Amino acid sequence: MRRSMTIATAAVALIGVFALAGCTTDPTVTPPAPSDSDPGPSQPGEAPANEWFDQALFDTQDAQRDVAPEGPADQPYLQYINAEMVDTAEYASDGAKKACFANASISNPWRQTGWITMNQQLKVLQESGAISEMETRDAQDSDDTQIADIDYFIEEGGCDVFIISPNSTAAMTPAVERACETGKPVIVFDRGVNTDCPVTFIHPIGGFAWGIDTAEFLIERLSPGDKVVGLRILPGVDVLEQRWAAAEKLFAEAGIDAVDYFTGADPAEIKSIISDELAKGEVKGIWMDAGDGAVAAIEAFEDAGLDYPVMTGEDEMSFLRKWKDTGLTGLAPVYSNFQWRTPLLAAQKIFAGEEIPKEWVLPQSPITAEELDAYLTANEGMPDGHYAKFGGENLPGFPEVWQQRQIP
Amino acid sequence: MNALRTLVSPRGAVFLLLIVLLVTVTILNPTFAEPGQFMRYIQRVAPVAIIAIGQYFVIIAGEFDLSQGSLITAQVIIAGNLVGQDDSRTVPVLLLMLVFGALVGLVNGLLTTLLQVPSFIVTLGMMLALLGGVMWWTGGAATGNPADSFRQIGRGGIRDLPLIDFLPWSVLILAGWLALGIWLTKRPYGKVLIALGDNARATRYAGARSWWITTRAFIISSVSATVSGVLLVGYAGVHPSVGRGYEFIAITAVVLGGVVLGGGRGWIVAAVAGAFVLEALFLVLNISGVPSSLRDAVQGVIIIAAVAYSGVVFRARRRTTPATASPDQGKGPDAPERTGAHTSAPRPALTPEGVAETRGD
């Protein structure tokens, strides 16, 4: 008797846990830390309660999408949008300089592609005598490591210029400020920090622009009530969260039924998620916050014997190739990979005393169906994890270095 | 009645949970009960179930294999880079992968047994070595998917069948692998392996060549990971993230199946059921629309609850049954194991409870 009592109690407890787990689906239980990188008030009101949404930044990036960038037409990595130029005469000096690069990580194909490009750019600048060497520390996605890396550079790096690709916004701000206090130029790129002490902050337009481009593309081709599945890599990274925040808002306004999943870019998980959604009902669109794993999503439709969805991926080669093979209706948004060239070129300009943009906003335009063939031809022979807009076609070692993935 | 009692018993807990989850899925989405959909569900479980079978053999011997996940990753990349678009290479590369898998298992086993390095450390080292090797070889970006003939193993199947509509090759491979595993546990080898996990010293005194027995368990585990990798190349495609975390999924599945960490007790079929539970859980979360940011937490809570449940029931029964057996002792708790248990005899029906205390830790 006592035994069955215990079993019953345990069973009730188990069911209770299930129920509890079910109840806590209230979205207020999971407050993601709001991004500190985006000053400016967020708009409460009718907008969905996505704490990453920032109306001011949304509007800025929305407008920047339509601005024709200034700068050399054939060198997108030197173009800039709505720039406020700063004078760098105080840093002007002769001779080859030592660059110190605190990198967040090379843990994904996008960063690996950029890292290869950056090193080829370095070779050019070394040959021209602008940079003597670049000492790099890889923080392997750790804030603590990167803070230590930056402090090491400050104390004993013997650096002439600091290049920092921050791992996260808030945590890296004090370290970047310490680097600024040395009086040497500091260049920040990709993710931002909460200080304007760096000489320049280099980045493509941003996550909201990505979200607007992709959501508008899908909304135009779908009807209200259609279902869109959002495949997201991971939570909590501002550049990724902003993509979804913008898309989610626009989908809600257009009456599109959008659900989102975190996949870790694992194709097995992506395929299972899409298969389950297809078993539940019709899926008209696929939205991705990064194209990694897009092929598995498309194959889930093939295996279920269904028509292809309207889809937004990324300029990763695997998606572009599958897009071409299947002829689906697609768009490849771009988080401009060529930005990895810009920091070293900015360093060269700084030491030459040339004006550079204080906030260097690089162009960021999606690859459309009309441009697809051109990008496929230009990147023939590149591996699937390569990014079409890597911008290194005029660097030494092209294309072998990128084809062989020679990571220094 | 007996079957019911079996389900509430700790050894049946995993089957009970599986039934609850599958019924939940069917209620939420009735199309799941269609045979075609169900076959696809098994197809999805197959890679996980197969590595769980491999992990079972290692855990039952009292060891761990943490290198399974990165071995899958390595094998997936090998398939992608070596097969390329050339169909004629499918078979040679497949054989090469099996040899490579067996070799990894052999190294794991020999380091563990002959050099006496704890398997946790050996396989952790192997995990890092394989991941690093893959990174060095590919520079982080795989070349692309291999030829379709290779991918058919994990992606294709027999179509247009009556009743079940679609029979994926993965399902047949899983069935075969499980049959092989059950057969092996009934062989003297399987019994010695369990004895070794239970009491290594006594088994060695009894004359077992423990180093070779344990090493073979590691080879089984690595070859299982290889088979799983072959299926995943087809199911998911080639990507450096395929296989990531699978060693922990396999260990979780095995523990959910009531296999005792530390070795000596457990039923292979329950370990496979554990893999089915994990995928069913994933399915329930997909279909019920739990917000994406909450999913991992819900999944974790349910897994802990399931393992704790069997722990609680175990302890409860231990208290109510003193050292002398009650008449129904052998039937209730051990019934699902009966099919496989009558050969693994040296275990008195009463002792399992003693070890169960450590299980929730």
Image (cartoon, coloured by chain):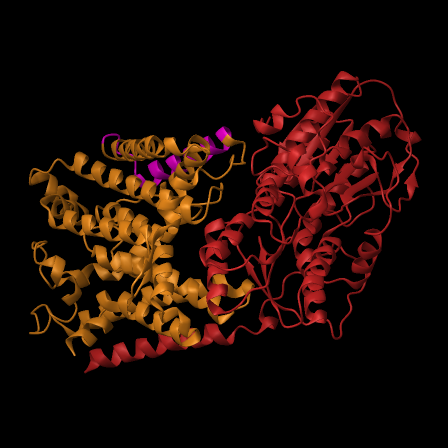
Chain colours: A red, B orange
Give the image location of residue A326, x and y in percent. Answer: 56, 48
Quadrant in which the N terminus of chain A is drawn: bottom left
- Magenta residues: mostly which secondary structure? helix
Residue B133 at x, y percent in the picture: 45, 31
Tell me the residue at 73%/71% (across/down).
A47
Position above or below: B238 against A46? above
Q: Nearer the viewer, residue A337 or A356?
A: A337
Q: Position of residue A30 (x, y in %)?
A: 59, 67
Residue found 44% across the figure and 38% down from its top: B147
Q: Is A69 displayed left or right of A167 in the figure?
A: right
Magenta-span inclusion, residue B116: yes
Relative to B179, residue A400 above or below: above
Part of the protein shown in magenta: B114-137
Q: Quadrant of the C terminus of chain A?
A: top right
Question: Which quarter of the picture shows residue B94?
Answer: top left
Q: Is residue B311 visible?
A: no
Residue B221 counted in the magenta span: no
In screen coordinates, is B128 left or right of A236?
Answer: left
Observer-nearest of B31 and A259: B31
Q: Is residue B143 visible?
A: yes
Relative to A70, is A215 above or below?
below
Q: How many marks?
A: 0
Q: Position of residue A261 (x, y in %)?
A: 55, 60
